Amino acid sequence: MEPESSDSLRTFGAVVQALREHAGLSRVEFAPLVQFSKHTVASIELGRRMPDDAFVERAEEVLGNTGALRKAARHLSRQPGLAPWFRRWARLEGLAVSLCTYECRLIPGLLQTEAYARTLFTNQLPPLGDEQIEAQWLARAERQQLLHERPNMAFSFILEEHLFLRRMGGAEVTRELVDHVVTVAERRNIEIQIMPLVRETHAGLDGPMQLLETPENRWYAYCEGQESGQLIAEPKVVSMLQMRYARMRSQALTPEDSVGLLQRMRGEL
């Protein structure tokens, strides 16, 4: 945890907006020039999102190469509440065109409800203070904007059935969680599959994983353990993990059957 102010993000965003308007560009016109969506540009200008290095460089080129953005970017604070080993992956997520996630430990952060997330935070060891818990939830909620701001980004989630059967936080928290996941699954760009509890073969026994594809069609992988995370760029390793993920997609229930299972589970709570 690093206690960080959002003032630097708001100041940087205001500078971007001022330079953009001075250049006579609207957000709609500016976005394709820096190869980011207009929603991402708006989030950066409003101080809600940490700008990626690529954004800074492209914005400099479009807005006159004054050097102002490069210098200002050096003083930006990191997103509060994100573990140090996760930050680089989180920045790649903000650029990705597709994201694949397999989880067997807990519901992925992108799909968590506030009640579910706060249950995790309040039971963390060593215990967190109230300010730390609030910072972690705000960071998670900010990251979840990916699901709303990136309608052209393809999301795939494979979740183990037992994650819902555990009833983390109690029946009411689980009911809300199931309802939320079912609602998210209705989006055209989001596919959610449940890996059934009883399964004779399973390609994901080595643990959770995430895969993403950048706009340049380069793939990265991320694997996380306790107090550590590994960002993988080696093509051979990434290819192996892609193969495993593809096998799991064929072993899990279809998206339609997955929603049906969740709805039956919801009725039993």
Image: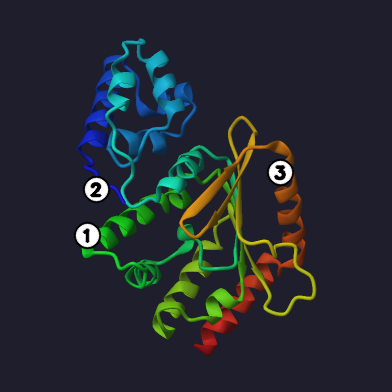
Q: Are the two marked residues, 1 and 2, in contact with CB atoms closer than 8 angstroms?
A: yes
Looking at the picture, how far across and down is residue 149, in whole percent?
44, 45
Where disc 1 sits, the SS reads helix
Q: Are the two marked residues, 1 and 3, in contact with CB atoms closer than 8 angstroms?
A: no
Does residue 230 lie above or below 62 as drawn? below
Q: Tell me the residue at 26%/15% (across/down).
A: 22
Rendered image quadrant of residue 177: bottom left
Of label 1 and label 3, which has the lower sequence position? 1
Indicate the amino acid at tag 2: Pro
- Name the residue that disc number 3 marks: 237
Where disc 3 sits, the SS reads helix
Of label 1 and label 2, which has the lower sequence position? 2
Q: Tell me the residue at 32%/26% (across/down).
A: 73
Looking at the picture, how far across and down is residue 265, in whole percent?
56, 83
Nearest the camera: 14 or 238?
238
Nearest the camera: 201 or 267?
201
Q: Are the two marked residues, 3 and 2, in contact with CB atoms closer than 8 angstroms?
A: no
- Name the residue that disc number 2 marks: 3
Does residue 235 lie above or below 240 as drawn? above
- Name the residue that disc number 1 marks: 131
Indicate the amino acid at tag 3: Val
**Other-residue count near label 3 (Cα within 10 Å), few / some / many at <14 / 14–19 / ≥20:** few
Q: Tell me the residue at 26%/60% (across/down).
A: 134
Rendered image quadrant of residue 49: top left
**Other-residue count near label 2 (Cα within 10 Å), few / some / many at <14 / 14–19 / ≥20:** few
- Examine the rendering and report whether any part of residue 101 can be seen: no
Asked if residue 206 lies left or right of residue 22, the reply is right
Looking at the picture, how far across and down is residue 57, in whole percent?
42, 20
Indicate the amino acid at tag 1: Glu
